[in-house]
């Protein structure tokens, strides 16, 4: 049973990989690839990373560069045309990206017939940093009741979500709506490995009762309701991605559960204001289809 | 928003919030707190309601100030003083219904009484617990104290307190006044064996 789940995931991702290979010449929007995989847009990029071992954007970029390599070697196409084919707008951008992976410029590569390459990592895949070695992660299946939250939508890099939290906390705080029972929840719609920083969507949410009325840019929505796979991330928020990777790569692939087409939730269990980053606790909640 | 740095009183008064594994002497100068008193079992109904009331007031005061562009600060961790009536000294042998406590959140001394009153009014209008009316602003100095980090369940504190009392004795000092605790961990999130609590007890020269 366990093997079959992983097998199904691998087959669906393989289909996407074939599709990418056949369409390297054009833009490949995430939505289109998610559709091709039959996974929800919310989870596709993370499942891809769990199965393939690198972020999808990185994967496509690498394939295009590798195709450029063979074009440099085996064709007489001009470098600028090869750069365009690989999705780069300028010679400089292409050279930079090429150097980063192969350790030499495209023209040196061509003139040396490929011997100028200095690569540390032949596959171009970076070993992902591990969260806490080989300790198996603790994952609980929990039912999260529906909850009413006030929220501020943030669009932009994750390291700027503090502004949304400030606005939300101030507005709720001065209205007397913050207390020891308030729950702080983040809704992450996008993956920073995939979506451009300025387009990342994130909702900063705090639970409120029925008496709270939306005002200004503070809106209200209902979240939760259903089963979630929950694991706790220990440490700074900028390392949350590592625990996500582990949850998708380790738990999801080995368990016979399907994901609901809803974003993941993050519950911030302590106050970053008076907690050292390494002591921060965050519950990551992955929405599951009911069995 | 204010351009000034956010104030963190625990960092500002690092020397008063040391958490050593062995007992240590600290000097507590005057400090201001939001405070609410009560009596009875820790974790009981009144205790829980008053923690809620105290946090409600603390957040409302802070955020109202922040919204108005006044000096921002961190809401400090929960602290609590514990004491018994009369000559009683031993908590372990005293019914928990008779334990007196004062819940505290350290607060900058620039927070004024009218800001507290406004926050209480806001919370009452919101229908929050009536205990918010019992929250006061208080300042006191505990003077010289013995302080030590306790790791583990609250029920195991007596062992740590014995070490602190023995240490005071070696300095020719004795305990007086109220036992004081600073809760570094959230007992709802952290398993009992990993709970970290700073224990503090005021001391004075032995009278003999």
Image (spheres, coloured by chain):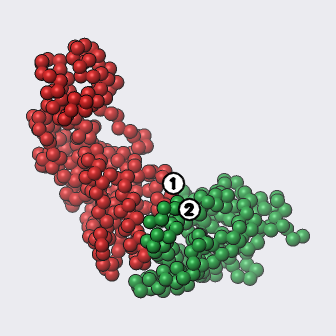
Chain colours: A red, B green
Secondary structure under tag 2 reads loop
The answer to whether residue B204 is left or right of residue B11 is right
Residue A270 vs A136, above or below: the answer is below
- Chain to which mark 2 belongs: B
Percent position of residue B42, x then y: 56, 74
Residue B169 position by quadrant: bottom right
Q: Residue at x 64, y 60 (%)?
A: B13
**Which label sits in the foreground, 2 or 1?**
2
Q: Which residue is mark 2?
A: B8
Residue A276's disc is 1
Front residue of A211/A84: it is A84
Front residue of A80/B124: it is A80
Q: Can see residue A147?
A: no
- Number of residues whose C-alpha sits closer than 10 Å to that of mark 1, classed few (under 14), some (14–19) or many (20 or more): few
Secondary structure under tag 1 reads loop
The answer to whether residue B18 is left or right of residue A85 is right
Q: Residue at x 13, y 35 (%)?
A: A24
On the rendered image, what quadrant is the C terminus of chain A found in? bottom left
């Amino acid at each position: 049973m366990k093997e079959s789940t992983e097998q199904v995931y691998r087959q669906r991702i393989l289909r996407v990989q074939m599709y990418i290979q056949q369409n390297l010449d054009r833009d490949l929007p995430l939505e289109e690839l998610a559709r091709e995989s039959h996974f929800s847009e919310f989870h596709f990029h993370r499942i891809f990373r769990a199965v393939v071992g690198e972020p999808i954007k990185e994967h496509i970029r690498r394939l295009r560069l590798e195709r450029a390599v063979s074009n440099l070697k085996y064709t007489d196409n001009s470098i600028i045309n090869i750069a365009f084919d690989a999705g780069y707008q300028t010679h400089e951008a292409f050279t930079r990206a090429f150097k980063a992976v192969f350790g030499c410029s495209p023209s040196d590569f061509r003139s040396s017939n490929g011997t100028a390459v200095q690569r540390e990592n032949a596959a171009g895949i970076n070993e992902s940093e591990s969260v806490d070695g080989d300790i198996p992660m603790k994952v609980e299946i929990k039912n999260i009741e529906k909850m009413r939250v006030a929220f501020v939508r943030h669009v932009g890099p994750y390291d700027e979500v503090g502004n949304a939290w400030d606005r939300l906390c101030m507005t709720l705080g001065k209205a007397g709506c913050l207390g020891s029972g308030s729950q702080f929840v983040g809704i992450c719609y996008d993956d920073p490995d995939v979506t451009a920083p300025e387009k990342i969507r994130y909702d900063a949410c705090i639970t409120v009762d029925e008496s709270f009325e939306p005002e200004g840019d503070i809106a209200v929505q209902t979240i939760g309701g259903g089963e979630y796979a929950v694991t706790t991330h220990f440490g700074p928020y900028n390392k949350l991605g590592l625990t996500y990777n582990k949850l998708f790569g380790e738990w999801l692939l080995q368990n016979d559960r399907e994901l609901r087409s809803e974003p993941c939730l993050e519950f911030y269990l302590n106050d970053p204001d008076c907690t050292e980053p390494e002591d921060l606790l965050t519950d990551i909640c992955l929405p599951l289809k009911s069995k | 928003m204010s351009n000034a740095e956010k104030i963190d009183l625990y960092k500002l008064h690092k020397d008063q919030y040391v958490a050593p594994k062995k007992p240590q002497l600290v000097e507590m100068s005057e400090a201001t707190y939001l405070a609410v008193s009560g009596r009875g079992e820790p974790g009981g109904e009144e205790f829980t309601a008053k923690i809620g009331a105290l946090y409600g007031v603390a957040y409302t005061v802070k955020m109202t100030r922040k919204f108005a562009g006044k000096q921002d600060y961190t809401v400090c961790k929960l602290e609590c003083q514990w004491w018994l009536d009369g000559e009683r000294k031993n908590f372990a042998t005293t019914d928990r219904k008779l334990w007196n406590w004062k819940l505290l959140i350290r607060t900058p001394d620039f927070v004024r009484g009218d800001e507290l009153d406004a926050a209480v009014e806001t919370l009452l209008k919101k229908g929050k617990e009536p205990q918010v009316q019992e929250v006061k602003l208080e300042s006191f100095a505990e003077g010289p104290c013995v302080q030590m980090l306790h790791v583990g369940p609250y029920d195991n504190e007596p062992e740590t307190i014995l070490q602190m009392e023995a240490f005071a004795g070696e300095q020719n000092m004795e305990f007086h006044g109220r036992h004081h605790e600073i809760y570094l961990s959230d007992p709802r999130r952290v398993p009992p064996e990993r709970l970290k609590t700073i224990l503090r007890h005021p001391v004075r020269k032995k009278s003999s």
